[in-house]
Image (cartoon, rainbow, N blue to C red):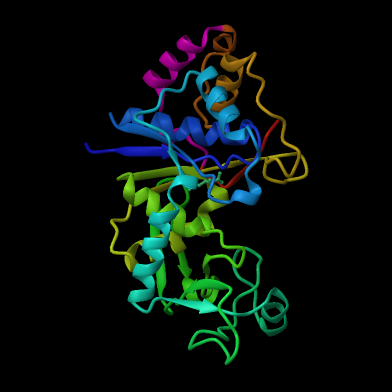
């Protein structure tokens, strides 16, 4: 079977337990299918990229015994490809320039988008007001239901116009949006299966929609549960998640396997990284992944 998966961290900080879960699940799924597993550094958002974080993430993956196929793809080196995709969307009249300021967007919004942000009211959909120059570029979305079937999360359906609205492709600060970059790169790298955290579940219909606009193939999607802290917040740098302790990679891997419902023998936490991988590669069962979006990390 032709299977190509990937792990795509954003180098905004060190690798933490939440990112280890996504890395491990995507890698084990790829290997279980005899497939390839790629690493892509999602450093497209320059202002959010922390100096040294990308190198730290790669060293941490190596310390945990991850072996990826091929070269790392760096999004910061892919700006021409994102521009070409935006040009293609413009040529198809699917992308338009938007002159609205944050304040204007807030004043005119009448509804919230699924991610809690504001739904764009469409002021510039048919051209920017006279004398105003575009600040950002948006995708002109149709009133369409997008659905996909996720092996863990079930059927997910979203109406792009109602739930997301005309979303941003190139931001006013001249940074390409994650949604565009991820779709262009998944297609460029020939990714057939995306395995990632359920915090990105809401983004997937947008990405499927963009793939259709750009005539790209649609990968399969699987979203594993996301670890939360005691306050119910997703583990992330913003919520104070601790960097993984690279002194105890085997114990970290065993903890992540437990989180993913695999429940290896407890003594494996004292074994070598190689032994943990041997067990994981031989015993991985996707069916055991808990079918939920969030799990509190004990
Ligand atoms: N870079 C994204 C993140 O770290 C993940 C992107 C993806 O897996 O599609 O949240």
Residue 5: tell me if it is visible. yes
Quadrant location, the C terminus: top right
Residue 129 belongs to magenta span: no
In terms of image quadrants, where is residue 141? bottom left
293 shown above or below 99: above
Quadrant location, the N terminus: top left
Residue 281 belongs to magenta span: yes
- Residue 236 is left or right of residue 202, and the answer is right
278 shown above or below 152: above
Q: Position of residue 11 (x, y in %)?
A: 59, 39
Q: Position of residue 113 (x, y in %)?
A: 60, 70
Q: Which residue occupies 65% across, 73% down? A: 118
Q: Which residues are magenta?
A: 271-290
Q: Which residue occupies 41% across, 66% down? A: 86
Q: Position of residue 261 (x, y in %)?
A: 52, 30
Q: Which residue occupies 41% across, 23% down? A: 67
Taking depth in this image into account, of 27 and 52 the one nearest to the observer is: 52
In terms of image quadrants, where is residue 281? top left
Q: In the displayed orientation, state which residue is furthest to the left.
A: 1
Q: In the displayed orientation, state which residue is furthest to the bottom.
A: 130
141 shown above or below 297: below
């Amino acid at each position: 079977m032709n299977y190509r998966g990937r792990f795509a961290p954003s180098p905004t900080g060190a690798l933490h337990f939440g990112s280890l879960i996504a890395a491990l699940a995507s890698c084990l799924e790829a290997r279980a299918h005899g497939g390839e597993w790629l690493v892509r550094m999602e450093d497209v958002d320059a202002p959010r990229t922390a100096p040294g974080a990308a190198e730290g993430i790669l060293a941490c993956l190596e310390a945990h015994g991850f072996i990826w196929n091929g070269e790392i793809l760096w999004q910061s080196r892919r700006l021409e490809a994102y521009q070409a995709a935006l040009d293609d969307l413009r040529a198809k009249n699917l992308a338009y320039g938007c002159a609205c300021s944050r304040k204007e967007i807030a004043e005119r919004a009448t509804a919230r988008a699924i991610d809690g942000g504001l739904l764009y009211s469409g002021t510039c959909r048919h051209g920017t007001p006279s004398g105003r120059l575009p600040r950002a570029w948006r995708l002109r979305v149709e009133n369409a239901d997008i659905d996909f079937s996720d092996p863990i999360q079930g059927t997910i359906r979203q109406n792009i116009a109602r739930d997301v609205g005309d979303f941003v492709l190139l931001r006013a600060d001249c940074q390409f949006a994650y949604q565009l970059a991820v779709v262009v790169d998944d297609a460029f790298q020939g990714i057939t299966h995306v395995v990632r955290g359920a915090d990105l579940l809401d983004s997937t219909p947008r990405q499927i929609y963009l793939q259709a606009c750009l005539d790209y193939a649609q990968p399969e999607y699987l979203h594993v549960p996301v670890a939360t802290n005691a306050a119910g917040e997703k583990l992330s740098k913003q919520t104070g998640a601790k960097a993984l302790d690279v002194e105890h990679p085997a114990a970290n891997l065993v903890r992540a396997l437990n989180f993913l419902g695999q429940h290896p023998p407890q003594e494996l936490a004292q074994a070598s990284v190689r032994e943990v991988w041997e067990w994981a590669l031989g015993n991985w069962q996707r069916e055991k992944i808990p079918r939920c979006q969030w799990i509190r990390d004990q």
